[in-house]
Amino acid sequence: MNKILLSLHVLAAVIAIGPVSVAASMFPPAARRTGAGEPAASTAATLPLLHRICRVYAGVGLAVPVLGFATASSMGILGSAWLITSIVLTAAAAGILVVLVLPGQEDLLEHIAAGDAVERSHTVRLAMYTGFFNLLWAAVTVLMVVRPGSTTGA
């Protein structure tokens, strides 16, 4: 059962978190191009699509911690320091996504729909939040692979 749960956990992480990381990273430069004379039709299709990918896969991404908790519980490692650190970093990444990245994308979409100019400071800030989100997920991935102090082998 452990192997099945672990496989599902890893698959959920790859399938859900990967698209959010990529789409969220693509959003700020695409938004920046709207002020650089990029055709409106191209932007009208690209930005909402990238935002939708982030929203939908963020919801699908809820399976990652659910399966992670199930896996850790079945393996009896819920009290491991590396796992607790991973849980905290995952919660921080989710918080950044829900509180900063998705609302930042929505704000830029509203400005663009209203015909307002895209301020570089908004796209830079959104890119920074997205970078933090991606960095936290990279740290979680490393912790899941290395498992410092683990007695289950690495």
Image: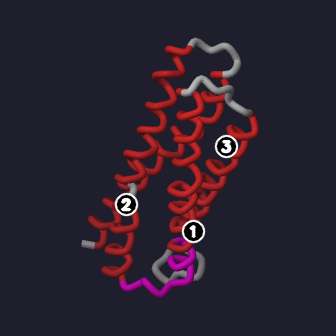
Q: Residue at x 46, y 31 (%)?
A: 48
* Relative horizontal placement of residue 27, taking residue 55 as reference (left or right): right
In depth, the one of 1 and 61 nearer the eye is: 61
Q: What is the crowding at mark 3: few (fewer than 14 residues within 10 Å), some, or many (at least 20)?
A: many
Work out which residue is located at the far right of the displayed protein and give it.
121
* Relative horizontal placement of residue 130, taking residue 3 as reference (left or right): right
Amino acid on which disc 3 is placed: Ala
The disc placed on residue 89 is 1
* Relative horizontal placement of residue 106, taking residue 3 as reference (left or right): right
60 up-or-down from 107: above or below: below
Q: Which residue is mark 3?
A: 127
Amino acid on which disc 2 is placed: Leu
Label located before the other in sequence (3 or 2): 2
Q: Which residue is mark 2?
A: 62
The picture places residue 70, in percent across and down from the top left corner, at 32, 74
124 up-or-down from 80: above or below: above
Distance of mark 3 from mark 2, alpha carbons? 23 Å
First to last magenta residue range: 76-86
Q: Residue at x 66, y 49 (%)?
A: 131
Work out which residue is located at the far front of the displayed protein and give it.
114
In depth, the one of 53 and 115 nearer the eye is: 115
In depth, the one of 20 and 30 nearer the eye is: 30
Q: Foreground mark, 3 or 1?
A: 3
Say what secondary structure mark 1 lies in.
helix
92 up-or-down from 75: above or below: above
| Residue 80 forms part of the magenta stretch | yes
Label located before the other in sequence (2 or 1): 2
Q: What is the crowding at mark 2: few (fewer than 14 residues within 10 Å), some, or many (at least 20)?
A: some
| Residue 141 forms part of the magenta stretch | no
